[in-house]
Amino acid sequence: MDKQMINDILNQLRDGELHEYYVTKEHFLPFREVLVAREDFKHFRGIAQQGGHVVYRYLNEPRS
């Protein structure tokens, strides 16, 4: 999973093309590295799953 692919996924979440995206434990660190560098970082919510996986969703209102 490269940075361009991650940005494409995050843009799809932002644009409403995806409702949520499941990130496996193996891809979490590269995914998060790209996510936190984005200007709209606070609009994304990661929901931890069992086994170290995370489901990301986009929020219309940024979290505090």
Image: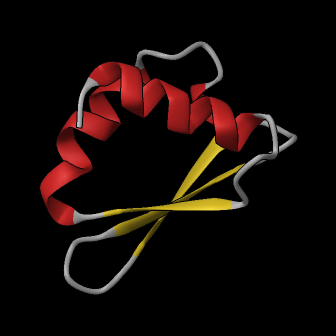
**Which quadrant holds the N terminus?**
top left
The number of numbered discs placed on residues in the rendered structure image is 0
Q: Can residue 58 be seen at all in this image of the molecule?
A: yes
| Residue 43 visible somewhere in the drawing | no
Between 1 and 46, the one lying in front of the other is 1
Most extreme residue toward the bottom, as rendered?
50
6 on left or right of 8: left
Q: Is residue 38 left or right of residue 60?
A: left
- With respect to residue 39, does 51 lie above or below? below
Residue drawn where x is 52% and y is 17% of the image: 38
Q: Quadrant of the rendered structure where residue 54 is?
A: bottom left
Q: Position of residue 51 (x, y in %)?
A: 20, 82
Its colouring scheme is: secondary structure
Asked if residue 1 is positioned above or below residue 38 in the image, the reply reads: below
| Rendered location of residue 28, percent (x, y) | 24, 50
Q: Residue at x 48, y 25 (%)?
A: 7
Image quadrant occupied by the C terminus: top right
In this view, which residue lies farthest toward the right? Answer: 60
Query: Which of the 4 image quarters holds residue 39?
Result: top right
Q: Is 21 on the left or on the right of 37, as rendered?
A: right
Q: Residue at the location (76% across, 47% down)?
A: 17
Q: Work out whether 19 lies above or below 17.
A: below
Front residue of 8 and 62:
8
The residue that appears at 12% across and 57% down in the rendered structure is: 26
Percent across and percent down for residue 27 are: 20, 50
The spot of residue 46 in percent (x, y) is 50, 57
User: Where 39 sits versus 22, above or below?
Assistant: above
